[in-house]
Image: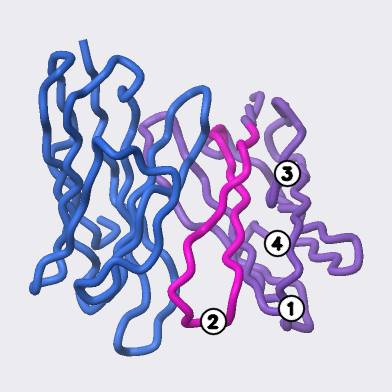
Amino acid sequence: DSGVTQTPKHLITATGQRVTLRCSPRSGDLSVYWYQQSLDQGLQFLIQYYNGEERAKGNILERFSAQQFPDLHSELNLSSLELGDSALYFCASSVSRGGNYGYTFGSGTRLTVV
Amino acid sequence: AQKITQTQPGMFVQEKEAVTLDCTYDTSDPSYGLFWYKQPSSGEMIFLIYQGSYDQQNATEGRYSLNFQKARKSANLVISASQLGDSAMYFCAMREGQTGANSKLTFGKGITLSVRP
């Protein structure tokens, strides 16, 4: 167990639908990053939150949004899903108050859009 | 320009042999960090080794070592005494900015390593 928890592990949904992916960071970590891994695009950075605030944006579609809550867990919302959104979505956390700056990844959510 | 380049499409190594996985990077930031992750077929991302741009010595972690050549902007991963369980995809990644800065990791496209018995 890496300490970063992602739920659900698998998700199958239809085109046009909306889903929410959840991430609980490693205890004490303030930053949460979301990545999308697809066969053709590799690992793409989507968005980063630090202590509740958006810190950086990557190649995130307008149909996607995220937030980080006061307890530091984060949710990634994907709407109007398309077949091409099928991918493995990772959450990673870093920057603990104790000074550990390593990045720890969750086990990912595998999204299949049919 | 790509920030992380991993050009080897797939690598094969005999069990118990050493293997080198190549990674070159591009950044103008004097402070950066280089990471290697392993992704087995089960999908999780496993941290292997880290090298900071100001580190004087090459990083080592058990059977993993990083051949850091700053002038050439390369950070090759060396796995010694390969094991069957080393068969996986390997990703090189870079963080630009100072340690502790909230910077994302930029990943290469990865290299598939297959260990033959």
- Residue type at the position of mark 2: Thr
C-alpha gap between disc 1 and disc 4? 22 Å
Chain letter of the residue beneath label 2 in the structure image: B
**Residue closest to the eye, B32 or A2:** B32
Q: Which residue is mark 3?
A: B5
SS label for mark 2: loop
Among the 4 quarters of the image, the one containing residue A88? top left
Display coloring: by chain
Secondary element under disc 1, as helix, strand or loop, is: loop
Q: Position of residue B77 (x, y in %)?
A: 71, 53
Q: CA distance from mark 2 to mark 1?
A: 12 Å
Whichever of callouts 3 and 1 sits on the residue coming sooner in the sequence is 3
Q: Which residue is mark 4?
A: B65
Few, some or many residues within 10 Å of mark 2 (<14, 14–19, 20+): some
Q: Residue at x 91, y 68 (%)?
A: B71
Q: Secondary structure at mark 3?
A: strand
Question: Which label was assigned to residue B30?
Answer: 1
Name the subunit of mark 3: B
**Three-letter residue code for mark 4:** Ser
Question: Residues in magenta?
Answer: B87-111
Is residue A9 depicted above or below A40 in this figure? below
Dot placed on the residue nearer the N-terminal end, 2 or 1: 1
Horizontal side, residue A1 vs residue B9: left or right = left
Q: Are marks 1 and 4 in contact (CB under 8 Å)?
A: no
